[in-house]
Image (cartoon, rainbow, N blue to C red):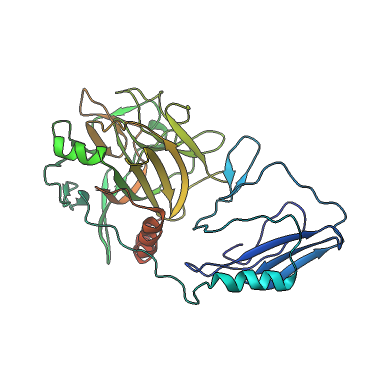
Amino acid sequence: YNQNGNHWCPSGPKINTTLEKNKYVHTVYIYDADNQWIQVYHNGVLLGMAENVAEFNPGSRLTIGGHAIDDGRLYMHWNGEVALVRMYDQPLEPSEVADKFNDLKLPEAPAAPVTSFGSPLFDAQWAADKTATNVGSQSSLEIISLPAGNTEIINVEGFGNIVNFNITQGDIHNRTYKDGFYLVKYGDDEDFKSKLADGFTMEVVCVSNFDQGQFWKRPMSSNKWGFTLKDGDVKKWAIFANSPDNDWWNYGDRDDAGYPIYIKDQVTKMESFAHMVYVYNAETKEIGLYMNGNFSCGKNQGTFPVGSLFSISGMPYTDKDEMAHGWNGKIAIARIYDEAYTQEQILGRYAELQPVIEKLNTTIQ
């Protein structure tokens, strides 16, 4: 299935259709050795077929949720719900396929998506003088504003102010900064820390300014958890949740520190603001990252290190009001919620943000 009607397949028959959002479908794949054909049915109707299939490669793995490659990484993620997966030891007849579809009694109309996050605990808003204020419900979270001379506040018509961090491209790696970021200290805020420990969601809407030389960049991070964009042969997002204080080598893609999320193809300058969501689910003991509504990766975390401070742009030190690995780009939304939101809620939130993202994209040079 492909949203734009195109398909990518390295070999074999190419049978394609477009799905309607938020609507369940019934799909059947049949290999018939006697007739030497492959058939695909969509909602009880033959969608397409490949004939003269003399040999059939059974493969070695079956993945629900995407396509797994040899090293275990998952590509072509399925972004949606799966309610039923079955295999039969014989090719079904067309009447049998139709009967199975009719027995499901799938609804005709798409289900209404679950939308809207609740009220945030933390919600940064920027003023024209480069100061920031938390307008979320956790009033104890005060923002220490440490803008740099090249920090820029941009007013976006129909949205409000956003912040642009203009860190010099060559200065990002192995540098610490006393300005050009916004800091929140919550080490003594037991109420907020307990809410983090019970599960939370962090939401950032941002865009990167540069193509190259980005190294490790963090749009929003605590001293113990967050996400970062790592540069190298292939840029990748990595989540982490146990980084030692003031130690930026021990996070990211080690088995005990985080999980690498490779972005398909080489990533250059971001052409659109991205919606990034970091979730810690205390019930399942898992952390996860969602990019533009899509689940990118997850990791079993166990006890979650709630940390003691976080910064917007970079990762903060615990022993001084400085940060490292600052974000070189714009940030429009930086929020924390006291609930671990689901895939469906995150998809709904991303859909709600589309008009906002269109306005924000007018600021991209």
Closer to us: 116 or 49: 49
Q: Is residue 210 left or right of residue 267?
A: left
Vertical order, 355 against 325 (above or below): below
User: Which quarter of the figure is the N terminus placed in?
Assistant: bottom right
| Residue 284 seen by the camera | yes
Query: Residue 8: x and y, percent?
Result: 67, 56
Closer to us: 271 or 82: 82
- The residue at the point 20 percent across, 52 percent down is 125
- The residue at the point 44 percent across, 44 percent down is 210
Vertical order, 51 against 291 (above or below): below
Q: Is residue 191 left or right of residue 12?
A: left
| Residue 179 seen by the camera | no
Closer to us: 69 or 365: 69
- The residue at the point 24 percent across, 47 percent down is 338
Question: Given the current orientation, which residue lies at the most extreme left position?
Answer: 140
Query: Residue 38: x and y, percent?
Result: 78, 61
- The residue at the point 47 percent across, 30 percent down is 253
Vertical order, 85 against 320 (above or below): below
Question: Given the current orientation, which residue lies at the most extreme bottom position?
Answer: 108
Query: Residue 238: x and y, percent?
Result: 44, 37
Q: Is residue 149 left or right of residue 256?
A: left
Q: Quadrant of residue 176?
A: top left
Query: Residue 79: x and y, percent?
Result: 50, 56
Closer to us: 234 or 239: 239
User: Which quarter of the figure is the C terminus placed in?
Assistant: bottom left
Number of labels in the image equals: 0
Q: Is residue 35 left or right of residue 340?
A: right
